[in-house]
Amino acid sequence: MAIARLHGGPLDGQVLPLDDEAQSTLILPYSETQVVYERAGALQNTGEADGPTSSDFHYVESEDDIDPDPDGRDE
């Protein structure tokens, strides 16, 4: 199993399982919208003894505006 390392956006720093190692785009749920991350670079750690195969994904956009305080309580 491979892992995706997310960079930027609201999920920065998260590590998620990657179902398909060839996947170039991740569309993930976030709050009441979706966020898009795209692969940046080749797979890393593809050997048998160097840890889990991983790939970096960078934030591209969200489907809607991301508002951390939709009710206006954080003032």
Image: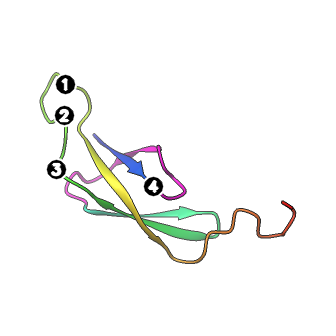
Q: Where in the figure is residue 51, as x and y percent of width and height? A: 25, 27
Q: What residue type is labelled 2?
A: Asn
Q: How far apart are marks 1 and 2 (CA)?
A: 5 Å
The earlier-in-sequence mark between 1 and 3 is 3
Q: Distance between the residues labelled 3 and 4?
A: 18 Å
Q: Which amino acid does label 3 sit on?
A: Ala
Q: Where in the figure is residue 32, as x and y percent of width and height? A: 64, 70
In front: label 1 or label 4 = 4
Q: How far apart are marks 3 and 2 (CA)?
A: 10 Å
Q: How far apart are marks 2 and 4 (CA)?
A: 22 Å
The earlier-in-sequence mark between 1 and 2 is 2
Report the magenta residues as a range: 8-23
Element type at mark 4: loop
Other residues around mark 4 within 10 Å, as few (<14) / some (14–19) / many (≥20):
few
Q: Nearer the viewer, residue 5 or 17?
A: 5
Q: Where in the figure is residue 58, as x and y percent of width and height? A: 36, 57
Against 12, residue 47 (above or below) is above
Q: Distance between the residues labelled 1 and 3?
A: 15 Å
For image coordinates 16% across by 21% down, the residue present is: 49
Q: What is the number of callouts on the image? A: 4
The earlier-in-sequence mark between 3 and 4 is 4
Query: Which quarter of the figure is the N terminus placed in?
Result: top left
Other residues around mark 1 within 10 Å, as few (<14) / some (14–19) / many (≥20):
few
Q: What residue type is labelled 4?
A: Gly
Question: Do residues under tags 3 and 2 come within 8 Å of each other at their CB atoms?
Answer: no
Element type at mark 3: loop
Residue under numbered circle 3: 42
Q: Which amino acid does label 1 sit on?
A: Asp
Residue under numbered circle 4: 8
Main SS class of the magenta portion in the image: loop
